[in-house]
């Protein structure tokens, strides 16, 4: 089971694109037929393509009606993206970033050959010619996550008498964690940017799937037993999750 950041529609068949005009902009428009879909779903992709998922028995005409009905929503999404693109998302001296749930200030000291960077408890040297420090700092976060998260997962598993086969730390773009049927837990390295209690909840959320492999009422009873304050943790993720999810660059593999 997976703790999702974004809805994944699953396998589907794409139909050649048409065009739709939104706020004076001409955008590609695609119908995506998905026999497993129960309703029409409108999305504006990161590639700027307007897509409508068409359920079994649905029609192109109805899909166009859905897009036209929600044209105002599309306009707001375009405006938000334009505003985001106008902001400078680079991490530099003075930028505040989240680490273990706290805002820490990036401090930079330039030498003749190297640049010393500090952000909270981490410090490292990097190329003085690098303008955006985000990839370098995220690599440091990922290194910490690869050491800490598997250890913490096994601690929590032992506490609740659960057996984990393996723990991996990855750079997922659409989920905080997942649990496979062979008892492998995969976690997003960004958990180290969360408060420890929230990171623990994400881990416990996945460990609970070792007992119930779905999100039924029974499953949530298990979660509540393992993490009584889980609703507070979910509230934190709801408020701050998108801030961590926004990734203009990738830290790269270690």
Image: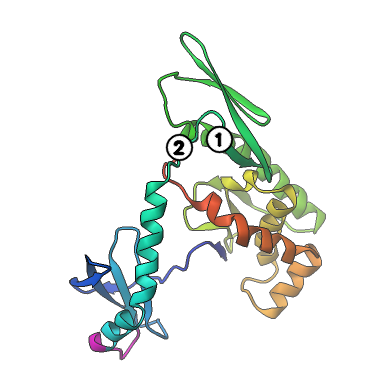
Residue 73: x and y in percent read 39, 73
- For disc 2, the neighbor class at 10 Å (few under 14, some 14 to 19, many from 20) is some
Q: Is residue 160 magenta?
A: no
Q: Looking at this rendering, what residue extends furthest in the bottom direction?
A: 57
- Looking at the image, residue 20 lies above or below residue 93: below
Residue at image mark 2: 90
- Residue 169: quadrant of the picture: top right
Residue drawn at (35%, 69%), measured in percent from left and top?
Answer: 75
- Looking at the image, residue 8 lies above or below residue 188: below
- Residue 70: quadrant of the picture: bottom left
Residue drawn at (35%, 70%), measured in percent from left and top?
Answer: 74
Residues tagged 1 and 2 counted as in contact (Cβ below 8 A): yes
- The local secondary structure at tag 1 comes to loop
- For disc 1, the neighbor class at 10 Å (few under 14, some 14 to 19, many from 20) is some
Residue at image mark 1: 95
In the foreground, 26 or 210: 26
Relative horizontal placement of residue 189, taking residue 66 as reference (left or right): right
Q: Quadrant of the N terminus?
A: bottom right
Mark with earlier residue (1, 2): 2
């Amino acid at each position: 089971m997976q703790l999702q950041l974004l809805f994944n529609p699953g396998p589907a068949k794409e139909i050649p694109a048409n065009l739709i005009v939104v706020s004076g902009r001409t955008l590609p428009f695609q119908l995506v037929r998905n026999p497993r879909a129960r309703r029409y779903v409108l999305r504006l992709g990161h590639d700027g393509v307007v897509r409508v998922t068409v359920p079994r028995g649905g029609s192109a005409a109805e899909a166009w009606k859905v897009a036209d009905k929600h044209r105002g929503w599309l306009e707001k999404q375009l405006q938000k993206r334009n505003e985001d693109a106008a902001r400078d998302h680079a991490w530099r001296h003075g930028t505040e970033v989240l680490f273990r749930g706290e805002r820490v200030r990036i401090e930079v000291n330039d030498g003749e050959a190297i640049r010393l960077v500090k952000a909270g408890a981490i410090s490292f040297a990097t190329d003085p010619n690098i303008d955006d420090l985000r990839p370098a700092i995220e690599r440091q976060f990922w290194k910490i996550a690869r050491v800490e998260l598997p250890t913490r997962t096994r601690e929590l598993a032992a506490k609740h008498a659960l057996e984990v086969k393996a723990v991996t730390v990855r750079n997922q773009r659409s989920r905080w964690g997942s649990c496979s049927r062979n008892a492998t837990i995969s976690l997003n390295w960004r958990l180290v940017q969360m408060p420890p209690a929230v990171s623990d909840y994400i881990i416990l959320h996945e460990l609970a799937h070792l007992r119930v492999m779905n999100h039924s009422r029974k499953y949530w009873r298990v979660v509540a037993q393992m993490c009584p304050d889980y609703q507070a943790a979910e509230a934190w993720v709801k408020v701050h999750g998108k801030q961590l999810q926004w990734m203009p660059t990738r830290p790269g593999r270690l």
